[in-house]
Amino acid sequence: MASVLTSARPLVGVTASVHGSRVAWWANRLALWRAGARAVRITADSPYPIDELDGLVVGGGDDIDASLYGEAARPHIRIDPQRDRLELNALDCAEKRRLPVLGICRGSQMINVHRGGTLHMDIHEVYEEAQRMRTVLPRKRIRIEPDSRLYGILGIGECRVNALHHQSVNRLGDGLRTVARERSGVVQGIESANHPFLIGVQWHPEYLVADERQQGLFRTLVDASAGHPALVAA
């Protein structure tokens, strides 16, 4: 019976760096398991056929190569070109298959870059009022657009989130809209209106394990991955 139940769970891929944080992977794996899915870790040295996935999480990690959005690389910034290529290819495939996709932190930025958008390489150079914060605890307040899918998932117009980033979305990619910001103006959430489920959040919901609203992001992704018509068509 256990094997039947396991096989019935949709399979969701989670992208990561080869030497990336195992803590993030286990947090995502737990969140997806609690939401009813199986998870597989996808890295440049351990790829997985995207055609065999039911959903995709583009996870957090190092900065994206600035040349991918027309900027010059900066010294002392750690990038992972192999992972960049892996995720761009995964998003290409996910786009063709209309797979549900959740982007987390770097993953949200990669969704934007994949759609032809750009990034602020250092938010504090652009948003002088932005809080200088790095914490897995929900200490940053954001506002969510009431007509967005993100609002429908979280069910609230304001909430507190964690912050582990120094970059953010700048110019939006094709078909994307901003659906959440912090008070300083930094983009905290993006989504596509013409894709069954394509959402990017700048924070890390996988670390907010006790927040049922935040875990709803994973539940909704898993429901869409399982092919629930009402969610996929929304």
Image (cartoon, rainbow, N blue to C red):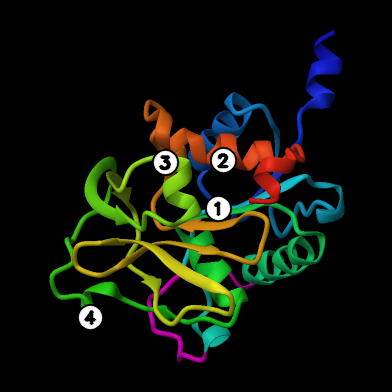
Single out the residue that lies furthest toward the left: 129
Q: Nearer the viewer, mark 3 or mark 4?
A: 3
Report the amino acid beneath label 4. Glu
Q: Which of the 4 image quarters holds residue 137?
A: top left
161 vs 221, nearest the viewer: 221
**From the viewer's perspective, is 37 left or right of 65?**
right
Instruction: Find residue 59 and name its label.
Output: 1
**Among the two numbered marks 3 and 1 on one chain, the one whose residue lies closer to the N terminus:** 1
Residue 181 position, x and y percent, is 30, 62
Residue 71 position, x and y percent, is 46, 90
In the picture of the structure, the residue carrying the numbered disc 3 is 154
Cβ atoms under marks 2 and 4 closer than 8 Å: no
Which SS class for mark 2?
A: helix
* Label 3: few (<14), some (14–19) or many (≥20) C-alpha neighbours in 10 Å: some
Q: Residue at x 39, y 79 (%)?
A: 170
Q: Is residue 76 above or below residue 7?
A: below
Report the amino acid beneath label 1. Gly
Cβ atoms under marks 2 and 1 closer than 8 Å: yes
In the picture of the structure, the residue carrying the numbered disc 2 is 25
